[in-house]
Image (cartoon, helix red, strand yellow):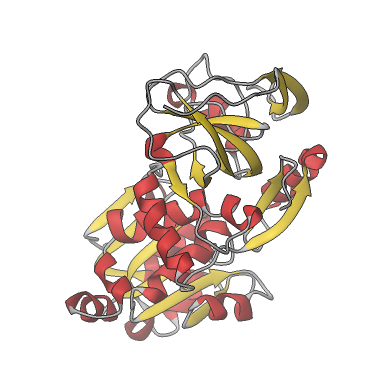
Amino acid sequence: MSPPVPLPQTMKQLLQPSVQSTRLILTTAPVPIPTAPDDVLIHVAAAAPCAGELLWAKNFPDSVPADKEMVPCQDLAGTVVQSSPSSSSPFKPGDRVFCRVDASRAGTAREYALAKVSELALIPEGLGWVEAAATPLSALTAWQALFVRGTLDVAGLTGEGEAVEKNKGKRVLVTGAAGGVGSWAVQLASLAGAGAVVAVCGAGKEDAVRKLGATEVVDYTQTSIEEWVAADPAAREVDFVFDVVGGKTLAGCWRAVREGGALISVNTPPDMVRPAGLEKEVGKSLFFIVEPLGSNLAEVAELIRAGKVRPTVDSVWPFEQFEKAFEKVESGHTNGKIVIKVGAEEV
């Protein structure tokens, strides 16, 4: 049982007053109290928004509880304050932690937030608040897409053994490769030993994605995926596509994936945009929603600690400039994650 910690009665938080509008307000609210056995109260240092999140409740009402307190941002980095009196949490007051809070619950754009034990991981030494807040959603999504849902063998991350040889035979294509999720996917696919990592990104981002591990780059502003693969299908077709963009980009990926390959998207079910008349059978075609698993995040943290991967941060915004932060997120033109400074800690 954690010792009692003096807490303020109220805190600052962002709130979405109506799910029919993306308007946010900065307001005050009571500090939440950890009551469930797996609750952990976190003093939030930084949080990170996600593109499209202010439309989730409107567009997917069945996936968002009607009684959810509409606080945005599901990613946080902060300090453990206390756990539920009945908790046997391994996380102690003062621990620096990060996580993604499940989207069915209030988010983390608030000075104090509740997380579940299963969602949390310790921040690796040397990683600051901003980079830590930029990590959970992006890293978890890429990890699960490549190694849980996809066809790369996670054991390849060790750099030795049969998994390395297995992964070496795979060509992987990542859309949105310079963004928050895509930049992680490029790093992890490269680290796992993929034979080729094709990064699809915008103009001026080639050097950045090559530094992350991309072996080939497609500038979608100059060349469509269809045009790129048509120039040399035998050499350019890929075994595995990981898409974060959807729409025409994902439709183009059907031309790039080879017969029997895999199409994984976190934007749109791939079959919804399959080109009419395309006669190609893939081994796997699926859409998934990330699971906020602290166990996966702890594995990512170990790679960060070892200096093998690193989050990519586009920009950092003061809490009071939340509107500009969300505008930047929704622009669709970021190099990594947007982070909002929430707490008073030096970030």
| Along the viewing direction, whichever of 131 and 64 lies nearer the viewer | 131
Where 222 falls versus 329 (above or below)?
below
Q: Which residue is drawn at the image coordinates 68% and 50% (left, top)?
A: 339
Residue plotted at (52% across, 14% down): 67
Q: Is residue 334 visible?
A: no
For image coordinates 70% across by 17% down, the residue present is 9
Q: Position of residue 29 (x, y in %)?
A: 70, 18
Residue 229 visible to an observer of this rendering: yes
Q: Give the position of the N terminus as an image quadrant.
A: top left
Residue sitting nearer the eye, 264 or 345? 345
Image position of 36 (left or right of 158): right
Q: Give coordinates of residue 6: x percent, y percent.
A: 64, 24
Position of residue 48 measured from the top left corner of the image (x, y, whole percent): 62, 45
The image quarter containing residue 334 is bottom right
Q: Quadrant of residue 237?
A: bottom left
Residue at the limit of the structure toward the front, as seen here: 3
In the picture shown, does residue 13 fall above or below 292?
A: above
User: In this view of the protein, which residue sits in the foreground, 318 or 129?
Assistant: 129
Left or right: where does residue 260 sit relative to residue 188? left
- Image spot of residue 56 (x, y percent): 54, 31
Q: Disc count in the image?
A: 0
Seen as rendered, the residue at the extreme top is: 67
Q: Residue at x 33, y 81 (%)?
A: 195
Q: Is residue 5 above or below residue 336?
A: above
Residue found at the very far right of the displayed protein = 320
Give the vertical position of 162 relative to 60 (above or below): below
